[in-house]
Image (cartoon, helix red, strand yellow):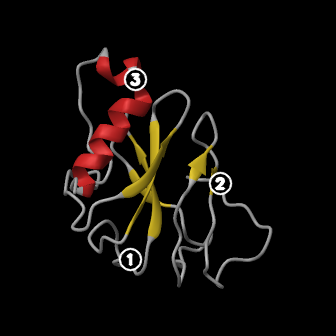
Amino acid sequence: MVPSALLAIVLTLFLAGPALAAAGTVSLASSTAAGVQADNGGSTTAISGDGRYVVFSSISTNLGNPPTANSQVFRKDLSTGALVLVSCTATGVQGNNACDFACLSYDGRYVAGPTRTRRFPWRRTREAP
Protein backbone atom coordinates (compact mmCIF):
# COMPACT_ATOMS: atom_id res chain seq x y z
CA MET A 1 0.00 0.00 0.00
CA VAL A 2 1.31 3.47 -0.91
CA PRO A 3 1.42 5.93 2.02
CA SER A 4 -1.16 8.67 1.44
CA ALA A 5 1.40 11.50 1.73
CA LEU A 6 3.38 9.92 -1.09
CA LEU A 7 0.18 9.45 -3.03
CA ALA A 8 -0.56 13.17 -2.71
CA ILE A 9 2.89 14.01 -4.09
CA VAL A 10 2.62 11.55 -6.96
CA LEU A 11 -0.88 12.67 -7.91
CA THR A 12 0.16 16.31 -7.72
CA LEU A 13 3.03 15.71 -10.13
CA PHE A 14 0.96 13.51 -12.42
CA LEU A 15 -1.97 15.90 -12.62
CA ALA A 16 0.03 19.13 -12.76
CA GLY A 17 2.30 17.75 -15.45
CA PRO A 18 4.76 20.15 -16.99
CA ALA A 19 3.76 23.13 -14.82
CA LEU A 20 5.49 21.66 -11.76
CA ALA A 21 7.94 19.37 -13.51
CA ALA A 22 9.44 22.23 -15.54
CA ALA A 23 10.20 24.17 -12.38
CA GLY A 24 11.87 21.08 -10.92
CA THR A 25 9.89 21.23 -7.72
CA VAL A 26 7.99 18.63 -5.77
CA SER A 27 5.21 19.85 -3.49
CA LEU A 28 3.53 17.95 -0.69
CA ALA A 29 -0.09 19.03 -0.84
CA SER A 30 -1.11 17.36 2.43
CA SER A 31 0.84 19.74 4.66
CA THR A 32 0.29 23.05 6.44
CA ALA A 33 1.69 26.36 5.19
CA ALA A 34 4.49 25.87 7.74
CA GLY A 35 5.36 22.53 6.13
CA VAL A 36 3.94 20.25 8.84
CA GLN A 37 2.99 16.98 7.18
CA ALA A 38 -0.55 15.71 7.72
CA ASP A 39 -0.64 13.09 10.48
CA ASN A 40 -3.02 10.96 8.44
CA GLY A 41 -2.17 11.93 4.86
CA GLY A 42 -4.58 12.91 2.15
CA SER A 43 -6.56 11.25 -0.60
CA THR A 44 -9.01 11.86 -3.44
CA THR A 45 -7.03 14.73 -4.92
CA ALA A 46 -7.84 17.11 -7.75
CA ILE A 47 -5.82 19.97 -9.23
CA SER A 48 -6.86 23.23 -10.85
CA GLY A 49 -6.38 23.72 -14.57
CA ASP A 50 -3.48 26.10 -14.08
CA GLY A 51 -1.79 23.76 -11.56
CA ARG A 52 -1.83 26.29 -8.73
CA TYR A 53 -4.39 24.67 -6.40
CA VAL A 54 -4.84 21.12 -5.14
CA VAL A 55 -7.86 19.88 -3.19
CA PHE A 56 -7.77 16.72 -1.14
CA SER A 57 -9.70 15.02 1.61
CA SER A 58 -8.06 14.00 4.85
CA ILE A 59 -8.86 12.63 8.29
CA SER A 60 -5.72 14.25 9.69
CA THR A 61 -6.12 16.15 12.94
CA ASN A 62 -3.14 18.50 12.63
CA LEU A 63 -4.00 20.51 9.52
CA GLY A 64 -6.01 23.24 11.19
CA ASN A 65 -7.13 24.87 14.37
CA PRO A 66 -9.37 23.53 15.77
CA PRO A 67 -8.39 20.01 14.73
CA THR A 68 -10.69 18.52 12.13
CA ALA A 69 -13.05 15.65 12.76
CA ASN A 70 -14.12 13.10 10.15
CA SER A 71 -12.91 13.37 6.58
CA GLN A 72 -12.64 17.02 5.56
CA VAL A 73 -11.70 18.77 2.31
CA PHE A 74 -8.72 21.13 2.10
CA ARG A 75 -7.40 23.38 -0.67
CA LYS A 76 -3.65 23.91 -0.93
CA ASP A 77 -2.19 26.86 -2.84
CA LEU A 78 1.02 25.47 -4.34
CA SER A 79 2.29 29.00 -5.06
CA THR A 80 1.99 30.37 -1.51
CA GLY A 81 1.71 27.17 0.55
CA ALA A 82 -1.55 28.37 2.12
CA LEU A 83 -3.87 25.58 3.26
CA VAL A 84 -7.60 26.25 3.69
CA LEU A 85 -10.30 24.02 5.14
CA VAL A 86 -13.11 24.30 2.59
CA SER A 87 -15.57 21.79 4.04
CA CYS A 88 -16.95 24.32 6.50
CA THR A 89 -19.58 27.01 6.63
CA ALA A 90 -18.80 30.67 5.93
CA THR A 91 -18.34 31.11 9.69
CA GLY A 92 -15.85 28.23 9.95
CA VAL A 93 -18.08 25.48 11.35
CA GLN A 94 -16.73 22.14 10.12
CA GLY A 95 -18.83 19.44 8.57
CA ASN A 96 -19.98 16.90 11.17
CA ASN A 97 -19.74 13.95 8.81
CA ALA A 98 -17.53 12.85 5.93
CA CYS A 99 -16.69 15.32 3.17
CA ASP A 100 -14.60 13.93 0.34
CA PHE A 101 -14.17 13.44 -3.42
CA ALA A 102 -13.94 17.18 -4.08
CA CYS A 103 -13.36 18.77 -7.44
CA LEU A 104 -12.54 22.36 -8.26
CA SER A 105 -12.98 24.89 -11.02
CA TYR A 106 -10.28 25.54 -13.61
CA ASP A 107 -8.95 28.56 -11.70
CA GLY A 108 -9.33 26.90 -8.27
CA ARG A 109 -11.80 29.49 -7.05
CA TYR A 110 -14.70 27.08 -6.51
CA VAL A 111 -14.66 23.69 -4.77
CA ALA A 112 -17.52 21.19 -4.90
CA GLY A 113 -18.07 17.70 -3.60
CA PRO A 114 -20.45 15.35 -1.85
CA THR A 115 -20.93 15.34 1.89
CA ARG A 116 -23.01 13.54 4.47
CA THR A 117 -22.94 16.43 6.90
CA ARG A 118 -26.15 18.09 8.02
CA ARG A 119 -24.50 21.38 9.00
CA PHE A 120 -24.35 22.80 5.49
CA PRO A 121 -27.36 24.58 4.00
CA TRP A 122 -28.73 22.77 0.97
CA ARG A 123 -27.92 24.38 -2.40
CA ARG A 124 -25.45 26.85 -0.92
CA THR A 125 -22.03 27.40 -2.40
CA ARG A 126 -18.98 28.69 -0.62
CA GLU A 127 -16.22 30.45 -2.47
CA ALA A 128 -12.81 29.26 -1.35
CA PRO A 129 -10.88 32.15 0.26
Q: Amino acid at mark 2?
A: Glu
Q: Is residue 75 left or right of residue 2?
A: right
Rendered view: 22 above or below 107:
above
Q: Position of residue 124 (x, y in %)?
A: 76, 67
Which residue position holds label 1? Answer: 68
Q: Position of residue 33 (x, y in %)?
A: 29, 51
Circles 2 and 1: CB distance less than 8 Å?
no
- Mark 1, Cα crowd under 10 Å, few <14 / some 14-19 / many 20+, is many
Nearer-N-terminus badge (2/1): 1
Q: Position of residue 56 (x, y in %)?
A: 43, 55
Q: Is residue 59 left or right of residue 105?
A: left
Rendered view: 52 above or below 125:
above
Q: What's the mark number on residue 127?
A: 2
| Residue under the image location 67 percent in, 60 percent down | 126
Q: Amino acid at mark 1?
A: Thr
| Residue under the image location 34 percent in, 58 percent down | 42
Q: Secondary structure at mark 3?
A: loop
Q: Secondary structure at mark 1?
A: loop
Distance CA(mark 2)–CA(mark 3): 26 Å
**Mark 2 or 3: the one toward you:** 3
Quarter holding residue 78: top left
Which residue position holds label 3? Answer: 17
| Residue under the image location 60 percent in, 34 percent down | 107
| Residue under the image location 57 percent in, 40 percent down | 108
Rendered view: 118 above or below 6:
below
Q: Nearer the viewer, residue 110 or 49?
A: 49
Q: Amino acid at mark 3?
A: Gly
